[in-house]
Image (spheres, rainbow, N blue to C red):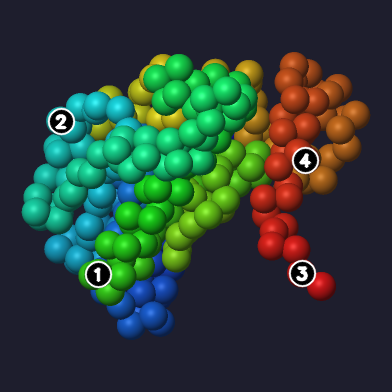
Amino acid sequence: MKKIFKICQKNEVDKICRFIQSTFQKQKLSKVIIGLSGGIDSAVVLSLLAKALLPHNIYPIHLPYFKTDLKILNLLIKSLKIPANNFSVINIKKPVDEIVNICHCEKKSDAVIIPSEVEGQSRIRLGNIMARTRMIILFDQAKKLDALVCGTENKSEHLLGYFTRFGDAASDIEPIQHLYKTQIYQLAKYLKIPREIINQPPTAGLWNGQTDEGQFGFTYKEADQVLSLYYDQRKSLKMIIKSGFPNVKIIIKMMRNNQFKNKTPYII
């Protein structure tokens, strides 16, 4: 199984950089906007952009809801020779809270969302509002600078449907969507992404203490192996279960339940 996910990092980086350069040449654009979360995916994509494009044409934007430490992000940007003035930090708490109040203002309604106390389905709704607020800002800045918005979605997230439609899934270009999370870690080490970013648990930043794997109930390592067998190799569910993965049914159920995200909008 390890061989399936093993990639030649240099060849992969070269291929992605050619793809990025070709895309910008075809669109006759030179500038790019990227949402920089502080996680491994956006750090890897930022590094790839810095290899493919001129650093002064890259505009990273950090869009936190909660207070965050910018030290590592500043070091990453400096190491990639991206001008410090290109890096923006915009806290989205105020607009998100205003949208929440507008959409859920009935105090007696079950739909009321209190950002500091949300749980269950309300957490998902709040997370969607956060993701869509971020995309409003990213695309607005792209319009301002005549730039493309670069996404940071990986294949694991895409297949599991772990994204917000018209939110973090909205982009003009997706350089790593063909790679599983397991493979992103290989690229991160090759690109010398700071250990602090590589070692931190993956999170969508939906609430304090939230992690992807904690929300899933399974690890990316297991999910990637199951998804590869089921989606890429077309193995049967019965065969995959016999392989000994404990969370096969949960992983495939999540994938199937979220398939609609890749099929909308429905048309005649």
Distance between the Cα atoms at labels 2 and 3?
Answer: 47 Å
Amino acid under label 2? Answer: Lys
Nearer the N terminus, badge 3 or badge 1?
1
Measuring from the top left, give residue 192's x and y in whole percent.
27, 38
The residue shown at (18%, 49%) is 88
Distance between the Cα atoms at labels 3 and 1?
Answer: 32 Å
Amino acid under label 3? Answer: Ile
Residue 75 can be seen, yes or no:
yes
Q: Quadrant of residue 268?
A: bottom right
Marks 3,1: beta carbons within 8 A: no
Nearer the N terminus, badge 1 or badge 4?
1
Amino acid under label 1? Answer: Lys
- Callout in the foreground (2, 1): 1
Q: Which residue is mark 1?
A: 144
Q: Which residue is mark 2?
A: 71
Nearer the N terminus, badge 2 or badge 1?
2
- Callout in the foreground (2, 3): 3
Q: Which residue is mark 3?
A: 267
What kind of element bears circle 4?
helix
Nearer the N terminus, badge 3 or badge 4?
4
